[in-house]
Amino acid sequence: MTSLSRIIKSSLASQQVSEDRTIKIRTFNFQQDETVEEAEPETINSSVFTEQARMEAEQIIEQANQKAWDILEEAKNSQKRWEQEERPLVLNAARDEGFQAGYDAGRQQGYEEMAESIAFAKDIIQSSKNDYRIKVESSERTILELGLMVAERILGHRLEDSEDTFYSIVKRAIREAREYEEVQLHVNPIHYGFILSQKDELEGIFPRQTDLYIYPDEQMEKHSCYIESSSGRINASVDSQLHEIKQKLLELLEGEDQ
C-alpha cells in the first residue's frame, strides 16, 4: 500500500533546488560660490538599481509562493487519493479484523502529513521574505557606494579643470576659522600661487583684523588643504569630507533598518 508520506515527500523533493588630530567641520557644499561652468556630470540612475533589486526580490517571492501553492495542491490531491484509494482498504481491514484503531491511525497519519506539508510551505514563504529584505538592504548600500564614487569622480574632474572649484573649498574652510586672530592655511604647491593671489579676498572673510598666513606643503595631497589655529587643525580636504559624508549616510541607513 502506497504511503502518503512517500507520495508527498517525493513531490516535495522534485520541487526543491538545491596623523594629525583632525577637527571635523560640517559637510561642505561643493557648489562653487562664483558662477563656474558646470562640468558635464557623470550620473548613475540609482532608480535603475533600486527597481532591478525590487523586481528580482518580487520574482523570488512570486516563485516561492507558487512553489508553496504547488506543495499545498499536491498535498490536497494526495489526501483525496488517500480518501478514495486507501481509506476503503483501511475501513475494510478494520471491519474485517475488528480494529477500529486501524482506521483512526490511518486518518491521523494523513492529517499529520498534511500539517507537515503546510508547515514546510510556510517556511518557504518566510525564507523568501527574508531573502527579499536582505536583497533590498544590500541594494541600498550598493547605491550609496556608487553615488559617492560618482561624486568623487565629478569633484576630481572639476578640481583638475578649474582653480575656482578648489578656491571655493578654501573659502568655506576659512569661514570655519573666521573667529580666530591668527590662521595658517596650508595647500599643495600647485595651488599656492593662485590662493596667494586671492589673499586679500580671503582676509575679507574675517570679521576683524586677523593674521592670515598661507604656506605651500609638498607633503599634502594634490587637492588637499588644512587650516591651523589656536584651537587646532581643520582638515578641509575633499577626501576627508567625502569620508565624513559617507559615514553620516551609512549611519542614517543603518538607523532606518533598526
Image: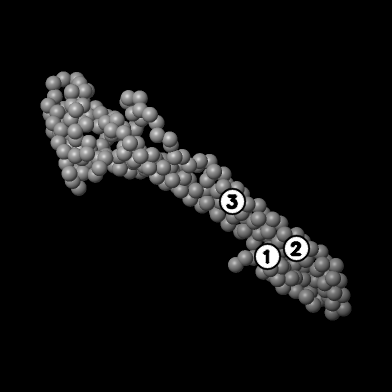
- With respect to residue 81, does 67 lie above or below? above
Q: Is residue 235 visible?
A: no
Amino acid residing under circle 1: Gln
Front residue of this view, candidates 215 and 39: 39
Instruction: State the mark number for residue 74.
Output: 2
Q: What secondary structure is marked by label 1?
A: helix
Give the x, y percent position of residue 192.
Answer: 19, 35
Q: Earlier in the sequence, mark 3 or mark 1?
A: 1
Q: x and y percent of residue 183 in the render?
A: 15, 31
- The x, y position of residue 243, in whole percent, is 33, 43
Q: Nearer the viewer, residue 86 or 35?
A: 35
Q: Is residue 25 above or below residue 61?
A: above
Element type at marker 3?
Answer: helix
Along the polypeptide, which appears first: circle 1 or circle 2? 1
At x 44%, y 40%, the residue is: 42
Q: Residues within 10 Å of mark 3 (few under 14, many from 20)?
A: some
Which circle, 3 or 1, is nearer the viewer? 3
Question: How far apart, in angstroms, are the residues tagged by discs 2 and 3?
Answer: 27 Å
Compare residues 19 and 17 and report the one nearer the observer. Answer: 19
Can you identify the residue that label 1 sits on? 15
Q: Earlier in the sequence, mark 2 or mark 3?
A: 3
| Mark 1 and mark 2: Cα distance apart in space | 11 Å
- Which marked residue is nearer to the observer: mark 2 or mark 3? 3
What is the crowding at mark 1: few (fewer than 14 residues within 10 Å), some, or many (at least 20)? few
Q: How many marks?
A: 3
Q: What is the quadrant of residue 144 in the picture?
A: top left
Q: Nearer the viewer, mark 1 or mark 2?
A: 1
Which kind of residue does numbered mark 2 sit on? Answer: Glu
Residue under numbered circle 3:
56
